[in-house]
């Protein structure tokens, strides 16, 4: 089957309601971080046409790759965003977070914390279209040391030639392997 025939077939049998039924193009990619251990990594690619990112269908999964030294939690943050008009930059921390700009349309995130709880706050950032956390408890014998999520969204996000789509995964806790598979459906304008 040639590439055009494969694409037409995939559009015809799309399992996601509304995805790839209009004849608009679909693109996909996957990436994996092997032996992630309290650090992170990123991938990105350039947008070469003015378009609207209509839908995202993203699957992320984590599994341990060896027995833990002790029982504990594993936590993985998975993000997707847009860097407008320039290659993205990342934090210098071991997590290598996306440097997403604060949104000019909203104020800062403020906590109300009358009980003096330990709270970690992120920022209200612009052009973040995926923000998922995976958490699992891993017993000492490793049983059930995996977790996954599937995310379908309709961001209707305007993208310009020269923007970059960027994807991030970082980890804390019991180490293992993390993978992201993504299908993006878009309309060139």
Image: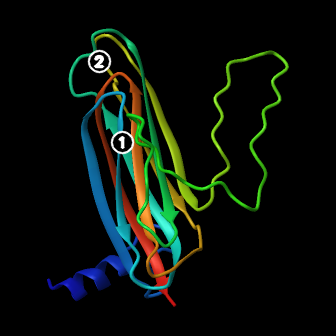
Query: As displayed, is residue 6 above or below residue 108?
Result: below
x 51%, y 51%: residue: 99
Q: Which secondary structure lies at badge 2?
A: loop
Q: Nearer the viewer, residue 153 or 50?
A: 50
Is residue 80 among the parts visible in the rendering? Answer: yes
* Label 2, residues with CA under 10 Å away: few <14, some 14-19, many ≥20: many
* Residue 168 horizontal/vertical position (percent): 41, 49
Residue 142 badge: 2
Q: Which residue is mark 1?
A: 61
Residue 129: image location, x then y, percent: 55, 59
The location of residue 72, given as percent across then percent down, is 41, 15
The numbered mark, 2 or 1, whose residue comes first in the sequence reads 1
What is the C-alpha distance between the residues marked 2 and 1? Answer: 16 Å
Secondary structure under tag 1 reads strand
In the rendered image, residue 185, in percent from the top left (x then y), is placed at: 45, 74
Point 36% across, 39% down: residue: 40
**Residue occupying the point 48% across, 74% down:** 19
């Amino acid at each position: 089957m040639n590439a055009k025939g494969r694409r037409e077939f995939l559009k015809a049998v799309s399992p996601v309601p509304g995805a790839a039924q209009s004849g608009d193009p679909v693109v996909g990619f996957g990436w994996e971080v092997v032996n992630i251990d309290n650090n992170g990594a990123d991938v990105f690619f350039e947008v070469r046409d003015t378009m609207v990112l209509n839908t995202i269908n993203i699957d992320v999964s984590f599994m341990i790759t060896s027995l833990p030294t002790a029982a504990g939690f594993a936590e993985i943050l998975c993000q997707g965003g847009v860097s407008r008009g320039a290659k993205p930059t990342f934090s210098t921390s071991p997590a290598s977070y996306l440097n997403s700009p604060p949104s000019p349309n909203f104020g800062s995130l403020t906590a109300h914390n009358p009980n003096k709880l330990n709270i970690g706050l992120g920022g209200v950032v612009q052009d973040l279209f995926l923000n998922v956390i995976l958490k699992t408890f891993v017993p000492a014998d490793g049983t059930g040391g995996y977790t996954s999520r599937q995310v379908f969204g309709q961001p209707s996000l305007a993208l310009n030639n020269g923007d970059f789509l960027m994807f991030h995964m970082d980890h804390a806790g019991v180490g293992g392997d993390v993978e992201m598979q993504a299908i993006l459906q878009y309309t060139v304008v």
